[in-house]
Image (spheres, rainbow, N blue to C red):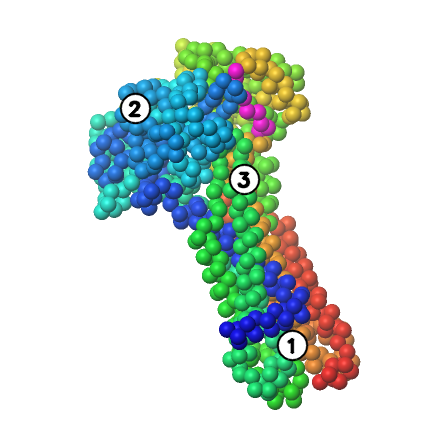
Amino acid sequence: MGTLLQDLRYGVRVLRKSPGFTVAAVVTLALAIGANAVVFSVMNALVIRPLNVPQGDSLYGLWRSPDEDMHESYPDYLDLRDRNHSFDGLIAWNMIEAGMDTGKEPADVWIYETSGNYFDALRLQPYLGRFFQPSDEHGPNSAPYAVLTYSFWHNRFHDDPNVVGRTVLLDKHPFTIIGVAPPEFHGTIVFFNPDFFVPIVNHSQFATDDLNSRKSHWMFMTLGHLKPGVTPAQAAADFDSIGAYLEKNYPKYDGRVHFKLVRPGMYGDYLGRPAQAFMTALMVLSGLILLAACANLGSLFAARAADRSREVALRLALGSTRRRIMRQLFTEALLISLVGGAIGLWGSVLMLHGLSAWQPFPRWPIHLTVTPDAHGYGVALLLTLVSAFLFGAIPVRQVLRTSPYEVVKAGSTAKLGRRVTVRDVLLVVQIAICAVLITSSMVAVRGLAHSLHNDFGFELQNRTMVETDLNAAGYKGDQVAAMQKRLIDAMASIPGVESVGLADAVPLAEGASDSNVFADTTTDLRPANAVADANLFRVSPEYFHAAGTALLMGRSFTWHDDKDSPRVAVVNREFARRMFGSADKALGRYFKMPDETRVQVVGIAEDGKYNFITENPQTAMFVPILQSPSTATFMIVHSDRDPQQLAGAIRSTLRKVDAALPAAIETRIRTMDIALFGPRMATIALGVMGVMGAMLAITGIFGMAAFSVSKRLRELGIRIALGAQRNEVLRTALGRPFKLLAVGSVAGLILGILASRVLAFIVYQATPRDPLVLAGAVLAMALLGLLATWIPAQRALKIDPVLLLREE
């Protein structure tokens, strides 16, 4: 222990004498370890760690395949629940927004509609009161009970224990609060935190009365605990047999008879696989950054060891052992690593707390709880120790081969070897990684910029979207259509408004419903015989003009296209191509819906993006909202007025129509936030990685250049004494670092171009063939090289041969 304390004290003194080296080393390691800690903690929260429920490892969601559909109808769910032999309780749930009125401040809340066995099957215990159970359900609208989430109880009801037994109005219907969920439970999707849980049998009080409709697959997911000894493959086969039963007994509404089991936390494979792939890629990149950081610090340590070669030689000559000197070097490396790791972990904790508090979409309850746990701290400590060993081991060879006699005879420096070393390879790899990250981040940024100016099948500029919930305001049946017409007329009367359109959903903002469509000659309307599963939008007559969707041929709708007139539709070009062969052949033709209704095509609209900006061409159809009523109401207001002034006028108009109507008003561009969230996060992550890679490239090239100059001080002094010019000195001193920079940059640009093809699947319009991107990447790498070699170049040019030879 005494020797260890001596090494620590001496290491601290040595590092204090070289503050520039110490700060550079600590910052480099802090960035690398902090990045790894952040990425691992997010990956642990989203991918590795199961849902925060008892025995979460055995929890699986149920999906129909091959179309990757997680939705079920309620009658199908009952059959799956009661007929399977593989799950210990199968639950169902759905997400929905509702209006809450407690008698004081009305508010919009998010609700999980759940089966009665939801809490029992998840093996949860209430924090306060009790949970509803299957025994509370006695048919439709028979269980007016609500359970609060802990966070909503804490924020809205201020931890009032007397909340149990109170009655609140949800969409004008009374519900009795019977309990509060435990603090650690936030629902069955890790990033979507609801406010209430209510029984799913009360579904018709919040939406269309399709609880007992087998053809309406509206529930989000079914999931449960797999029984001990049952494998996922066996469970899938069990559910396939139930699917065969459904197909046989309900041929019109079923037919997708194959099932698979998925992890539920990230919304199954729908988000789980992309998130896992992206987080894995980030984990690999952050690991490579840590490796590059270790290579950088190894180069700095090697250069420092070269500068300290006389000190090492004197210590050896005075009787010190090589083992003691190496232990001292490892002690210095460990000190730097521990300080850098502590700073990096501290920074990662701050960033993770910020991520946990971040709510990217104000009207959506999306929160990502990514606070580090014991696993995150353990990984950070392991990376800290491994890093210290990696970069501390690089100068060991120099120490082992140091000859005191040769050092004293030849001076503090010796001839720099010309062979390729491991350090050179690592520097090239690190520069290549930096070039990949810079190229990818530039491609992503350019792709995002292009995406906001491309044709999505609708216009973004001068459009405002108004969302309201007529069901929450108590409108039912025929009242809905009349109120929607009043709203359109009221919005159109606002000064400066050119047109107003209404829809039950809008592309790239709210998920559209979908429906199988069949050729007019098809008589067997099972899903397997469908031509396509088309996106379905229910719209008002002025929708296309208000949304900026071009009508290529045919006509739009009128107010005469109501439930008493023949069924009509406007389809997009892709729909016409798949159903009829081309758009020219589609006008006036018919197709069938699953309920055998014949629909005539009266118009052809341009193709667009409906669910994702990176999706392949999708089929879409627009039908008159009077022929297919819906309480969901999204109005597109086309106006050149200032958005803030227009929003104020819209609110004032809505209050005059019905003061009880809840409303969310956003510009059409802001409604794209959800669609652009993934690309934006990918761009930000790659941008941060690119900046870190650039910083590490600077320190890596600086380390190599400093090492090169340190090893050749005597040679450079002699060259200067013999009359060498400045450019010759620089070429001799820095030629090798610049060659490594060129090789790494070229390799990185090539890899960046290849990697950008993968990036195009995440960021719309991302292309590596953009001349601006290539020029920017080349310029960035050149600037990094100049910046990193500036200090070593100045040192080489300021060598005084007289002082150097006198010192020798």
At a point 60% along the width and 19% down the height, the residue shown is 650
Please tell me whether mark 2 or mark 3 is closer to you in this view.
Answer: 2
Q: Nearer the viewer, residue 610 or 433?
A: 433
At a point 65% along the width and 60% down the height, the residue shown is 784
Residue 284 seen in render = no
Residue 357's disc number: none
Tag 3: amino acid: Trp
Image quarter hosting the C terminus: bottom right
| Residue 588 x %, y % | 43, 20
- The residue that label 3 is drawn on is 358
Residue 307's disc number: 1
| Residue 683 x %, y % | 56, 46
At a point 25% along the width and 39% down the height, the residue shown is 87
769 up-or-down from 414: above or below: above
Give the mark nearest the N terminus, 3 or 1.
1
Tag 1: amino acid: Asp
Residue 136's disc number: 2
Q: Is residue 471 left or right of 122 when viewed as pictured?
A: right
The crowd level at tag 3 (other Cα within 10 Å; few <14, some 14-19, many 20+) is some
352 up-or-down from 498: above or below: below
Q: Which residues are magenta?
A: 660-668
184 up-or-down from 768: above or below: above
Give the mark nearest the N terminus, 1 or 2.
2
Secondary structure at badge 3 equals loop
Q: Is residue 134 left or right of 788 when viewed as pictured?
A: left
At a point 59% along the width and 78% down the height, the residue shown is 418
| Residue 165 x %, y % | 39, 22
Secondary structure at badge 1 equals helix
Is 663 magenta? The answer is yes
Real-space Cα separation, disc 3 to disc 1, in angstroms? 48 Å
Give the mark nearest the N terminus, 2 or 3.
2
493 up-or-down from 679: above or below: above
